[in-house]
């Protein structure tokens, strides 16, 4: 099972930044709401899903500073590895980030997700997957759980994600 994970508007939100004025300047740690990360952890422990990063954070590389001031990505092709460490520190110890969608531009996020799946699985062996994103351009049919950027990942969203991942075939 795979979660295609956006971060901004999913693991943070307008409400999070409103309630935590210092968080905006505390990048990247402050940009992860622990309550939202805990809901992600619930999806992970319930389903055993792996994560693929579809967030623009995967473009980050050098500007992103991880805990302790280390670079979140010394190499932008592998930024997802640093994001895994960050998710684990912030409350999702079960996070296993196995990749990130390609950086090619001019295509929607949904298209990038489908390309990632095509590169890694034959169509008939495609695993269950869910897309968590606040951007409707990430819409992939019944695999999409639209998150409200106002509040981020909620408990009902997490329930929906678990339902998508575990629905019979
Ligand atoms: Mg977003």
Image: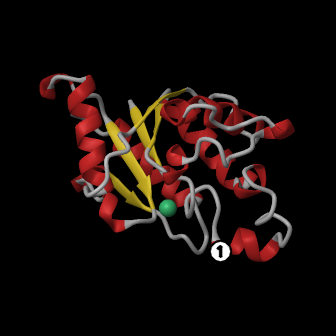
Task: Please tell me which residue lies in front, 130 or 79.
Answer: 79
Q: Quadrant of the N terminus?
A: top left
Where is residue 110 drawn, in percent x and y?
A: 28, 52
Query: How many neighbours does mark 1 have within 10 angstroms: few (below 14), some (14-19), or many (20 or more)?
Result: some
Q: In which quarter of the image is the C terminus?
A: top left
Q: In this view, does 164 lie to the left or right of 65?
A: left
The residue singled out by tag 1 in the image is 14
Where, by quadrant of the figure, is residue 88 drawn? Answer: top right
Which residue is depicted at the point 56% across and 35% down? Answer: 79
- Give the colouring mode of the picture: secondary structure
Which residue is depicted at the point 62% across and 48% down? Answer: 39
Q: In this view, does 151 lie to the left or right of 127?
A: right
Which residue is depicted at the point 22% across and 55% down? Answer: 141
Where is residue 18 drawn, in percent x and y?
A: 76, 77
Q: In this view, does 161 lie to the left or right of 112?
A: right
Which residue is depicted at the point 48% across and 64% down? Answer: 147
């Amino acid at each position: 099972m795979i979660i295609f994970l956006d971060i901004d508007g999913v693991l943070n939100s307008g409400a999070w930044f409103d309630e935590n004025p210092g968080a905006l300047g505390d990048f990247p740690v402050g940009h992860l709401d622990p309550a939202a990360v805990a809901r992600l952890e619930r999806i992970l422990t319930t389903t055993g899903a792996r994560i693929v990063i579809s967030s623009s954070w995967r473009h980050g590389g050098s500007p992103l500073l991880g805990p302790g001031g280390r670079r979140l990505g010394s190499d932008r092709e592998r930024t997802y590895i640093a994001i895994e460490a960050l998710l684990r520190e912030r409350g999702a110890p079960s996070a296993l980030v196995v990749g990130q969608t390609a950086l090619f531009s001019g295509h929607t996020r949904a298209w990038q997700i489908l390309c990632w799946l095509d590169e890694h699985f034959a169509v008939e062996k495609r695993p269950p997957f869910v897309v968590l994103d606040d951007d409707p351009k990430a819409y992939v049919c019944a695999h999409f759980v639209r998150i409200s950027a106002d509040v981020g990942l909620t408990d009902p969203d997490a329930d929906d994600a678990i339902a998508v991942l575990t629905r019979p075939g």
